[in-house]
Amino acid sequence: MDQRPIGVMDSGLGGLSVVRLMRQRMPHESVIFVGDQGHFPYGTRTQDEVRSFALTIGKFLVRQNIKLMVIACNTATAASLTLLQDKLPVPVIGVIRPGAEAAVSLPYHDRIGVIATESTTKDGAYVRTIKSLSPQTTVVAKATQPLVPIVEHGQTGTPKAQHAVDKELALFKQHPVDGLILGCTHFPFLTKEIMNTLGKSVAIIDPAGETVQLASRILTKHDALAPQDQQGQLTLYSTGTASDLAKGARQWLGDSNLTGEHLALF
Ligand code: DGL
């Protein structure tokens, strides 16, 4: 048993799509979330920049006495997972391998699409990981960076959001896929729009599911799950405007009591 919190980070509120599942499936775990809104978006930055932001946040989370860190950001996972695993004294997991594993375990996975930020797409981490797990799978990767600010700025569910999704996913009409990985943690909040565009025959893969399972497996292995009589607490920090993060969290986590705190880390 270990009542210490799990640390979670993203460039913005996308990482809440992972926190949401964590709260559902691991309700006893406390979570400290850092949204690096001060540097949002990560997807158009260099990997060196993202690596240094992620390491600073990781060190902060370690000072908060976390037992595990989840990089709930594909861009930061591609840029910094191995560095953080090397530098931090706690287990660190990312979202890319879990997402790739979920895709290749679909009954049909001959053709898999991946939508992600510019940086993740350029890095090629999804293509490499999927190919290593299933060499015969064809991967259609598309950078859809314009969808990120739509989520971050609360414009989901609007005609503007649907129009942007239609435009960004047009490629998958010419190149149909069996499943589409939401390779940016902001995108699960656009699932409705994405399903409207692609139709029901395309499986939508949110890496959050496998990521939370992996977190649970690691904690179980280390006998570090939270006590069953503990009610998990969520602490929200933003390096930008804390009230924006709290507003998103109240919306996406369905908890009207959530508040956020500004974190002057940089
Ligand atoms: N949510 C992040 C990801 O999963 C990054 C989005 C961004 O800041 O560009 O890649």
Image: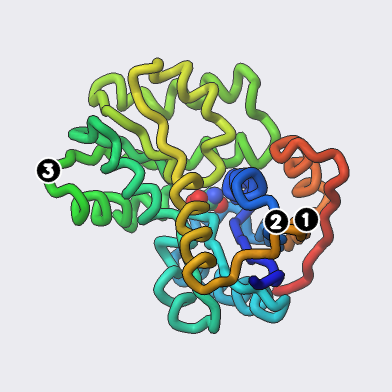
* Residue wearing tag 1: 231
| Label 1 – label 3 distance at C-alpha | 45 Å
Q: Nearer the viewer, mark 1 or mark 3?
A: 1
Identify residue type, mark 2: His
Q: CA distance from mark 1 to mark 2?
A: 5 Å
Q: Residue at x 51, y 26 (%)?
A: 164
Q: Give the labeled residue for mark 2.
A: 28
Residue 219 percent location from the top left of the image: 53, 67
Between disc 2 and disc 3, whose residue precedes?
Answer: 2
Residue 43 in the image, given as x and y percentages of width and height: 49, 53
Three-letter code for the amino acid on which mark 3 is drawn: Gln
Q: Are marks 1 and 2 in contact (CB under 8 Å)?
A: yes
Q: Is residue 197 above or below residue 230?
A: above
State the residue position of label 3. 136
Residue at image point 39% right, 27% down: 169
Q: Nearer the viewer, residue 162 or 112?
A: 112
Kindly identify the residue that appears in the image at 18 percent across and 48 percent down. Answer: 134
Q: What label sits on residue 148 in the rendered view?
A: none
